[in-house]
Image (cartoon, rainbow, N blue to C red):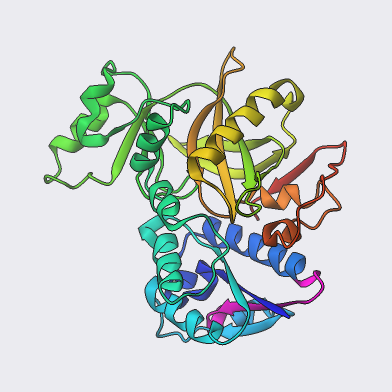
Amino acid sequence: MKRIILLEYFHADAVAYRQAAVSLRREGRSMLTALMADFGALPNISVTTALCPQAAADLQPNTDVLRIPERVTAAADIAAEVAEAAHGSETHVFLIAPEIGQVLIRLVRGLRRRNIPVIAPRTEVIEACSDKWQTFQLLQRSNLPTIPTECVENLSRLNLKPTDRCIVKPRDGAGCEGVFESTPKEIERRLSGSSPGAHQGLIVQPLVAGRTLSVAMIGQGAGHSPLFLPLAEQTITWASGRPRYRGGTVPAEGAGRLQSAVTELCHQTAWTLQLEDGYVGIDLLQPEGSDRLLITEINPRLCTSYLGYRRLTRTNLAECILHRAPAPPITWNDSSVSFKTD
């Protein structure tokens, strides 16, 4: 019997569990409980959930629990704890973790360095897609459509007017955390009042009005095309110049009209990433008045849209994630599904 260890970072790290933004912890819990149910429903699969003591007490899961001691808080140390528990058995690890602070890549490296199978894209892909500046460079090299991007210290290269609206993001951000709207004039003012290097972890993009969409892919093993999941529309609200991700709807309105463009973009992205294993989410923007799609981010991990996809089909998507056999065509429901982050 194969064992799957599920590790959601904010529920495995005791300090992160106490200190993380409520939105991140809620999103993490929603995805974790969904995966516990989906993997737990598969035959010949044993599920173990890695949890810190307080998360285990709060969640009380109906799976086996791998208790991560309260003293173990660094991502690399958590990986070591999980690896020790995984040795000597047919065990695979599935991670739900953010790019923030290099948490995701450190967990993956720590596990793979100890020869523990991780159901995820290649390490170098996770590394590139965990840094938004590296992601932009990857997209440019691959001739994939995206939004002009610069590191904040090179803002002038975007040739924006002082009052043009733009978006500032952390290079290692996840979701809407740390994202805010600004102008070149305001950014320059902040830079001039800060010490050199204080804002080196930020990127800037011109604000492009349009619909925020996403699509997801699930690797199906070497030599097989990934599964492409339906186009979703994201629900994002703005307050005081900062966005908040609240979930979305799948399929997105007008998804049929965009299907050809979405499929072509997925094929190109999958080829660029050489995607064989794991779940990848692609954030897209459809500019106003256009059917063109721009890639804004590539998330080399499970995304909240999984909550919508799993309700849109009778197929257990966890079976597709394991790709134990070529996945049969998935039948999607005709009606749309809305999903929230909490």
Q: Residue at 37% of width from left, 47% of height from top?
A: 131
**Does residue 62 sit above or below 250 in this rendering?**
below
In the image, taking residue 321 as reference, residue 13 lies left or right, namely: left
> Bounds of the magenta span?
40-55
Is 97 in front, or is 181?
Answer: 97
- Quarter-wise, where is residue 187 in the image? top left
Can residue 74 be seen here? The reply is no
Q: Residue at 53% of width from left, 80% of height from top?
A: 52
In the image, taking residue 30 as reference, residue 149 lies left or right, namely: left
Q: Is residue 43 magenta?
A: yes
Q: Residue at 21% of width from left, 31% of height from top?
A: 154
Can residue 232 be seen here? The reply is yes
Q: Residue at 48% of width from left, 59% of height from top?
A: 21
Q: What percent of the width, then of the height, locates residue 330?
A: 82, 46
Which quadrant, please, contains the N terminus? bottom right
Q: What percent of the width, then of the height, locates residue 14?
A: 46, 77
Which quadrant, please, contains the C terminus? bottom right
In the image, taking residue 301 as reference, residue 229 lies left or right, namely: right
Q: Residue furthest front?
A: 223
Q: What percent of the width, then of the height, locates residue 136?
A: 38, 35
- Quarter-wise, where is residue 260 in the image? top right
- Quarter-wise, where is residue 229 in the image? top right
Q: How many marks?
A: 0
Q: What percent of the width, then of the height, locates residue 139?
A: 42, 33
